[in-house]
Amino acid sequence: SILEAAERERTFIAIKPDGVQRGLISEIIHRFERKGYKLVAIKLVIPTKEFAEKHYHDLKGRPFFNGLRDFLSSGPVVAMVWEGQGVIKYGRKLIGATSPHNSEPGTIRGDLAVSVGRNTIHGSDGPETANAEIALWFKPEELVSYTSNAEKWLY
Ligand code: RTP
């Protein structure tokens, strides 16, 4: 590939059931797409409770864990993998702070959400979690490697 390794960094992003039900799918995809990141995998899934527990395994034992797990499995989730230079860290910046109360205007949660339990979107918090979450949600063949026309103008 003509892309450098850093430009092929990938993160796992999920639009949670509240975001899907509120009609925010295109709004959220728009923000990542417009920034210059490349969509390399996408699907709509209703996670089972067992699957939601795997996704949130590091939060097991927290008082909100059962509610969080039940909520994630309560309806369709848009699971995605986005690629681009710095996408893991900057993706979190686009998303905003965990609690929408602390999210700046201009961020997804700042603009589109009001409560921490319904914060519309998930994004991997580091390279290891990104790899683990991509592997949990997607089969290798569901990740699409391609060159976008925009790349030569982005990098
Ligand atoms: P995410 O993984 O969803 O991107 O969120 P995060 O890293 O910003 O936050 P984390 O601490 O990993 O928490 C995961 C999700 O749990 C819900 N949560 N509820 N006090 C509460 O009720 C509470 N605290 C966290 C949020 O939906 C958060 O996104």
Image: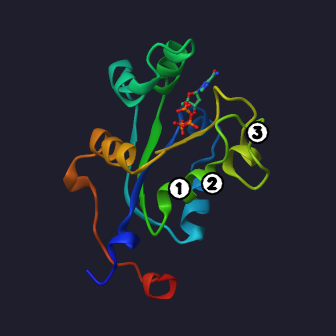
* Kind of element beneath mark 1: helix
- Residue closest to the far left: 141
Mark 2, Cα crowd under 10 Å, few <14 / some 14-19 / many 20+, is some
Residue marked by disc 2: 93
- Against 125, residue 65 (above or below) is above
Q: Nearer the viewer, residue 15 or 155?
A: 155
Residue 149 occupies which quadrant of the picture?
bottom left
Return the mark for residue 102. 3
Q: Are marks 3 and 1 in contact (CB under 8 Å)?
A: no
Residue 40 occupies which quadrant of the picture?
bottom left
Inspect the image, locate mark 1, and give the three-letter code of the amino acid beneath it: Lys
Inspect the image, locate mark 2, and give the three-letter code of the amino acid beneath it: Lys
Residue 67 pos. (x, y %) = 54, 15
Mark 1, Cα crowd under 10 Å, few <14 / some 14-19 / many 20+, is some
Residue 54 pos. (x, y %) = 34, 26
- Against 107, residue 76 (above or below) is above
Residue 110 occupies which quadrant of the picture?
top right
Q: Of the residues under marks 2 and 3, which one precedes in the sequence? A: 2
Residue 9 pos. (x, y %) = 38, 63
Q: Nearer the viewer, residue 27 or 35?
A: 35
Inspect the image, locate mark 3, and give the three-letter code of the amino acid beneath it: Asn
Mark pair 3, 1: CA separation = 17 Å
Q: Nearer the viewer, residue 136 or 63?
A: 63
Q: Is residue 19 left or right of residue 112?
A: left
Residue marked by disc 1: 89
Q: Of the residues under marks 3 and 1, which one precedes in the sequence? A: 1
Mark pair 2, 3: CA separation = 12 Å
The quadrant in which the N terminus is found is bottom left
* Kind of element beneath mark 3: loop
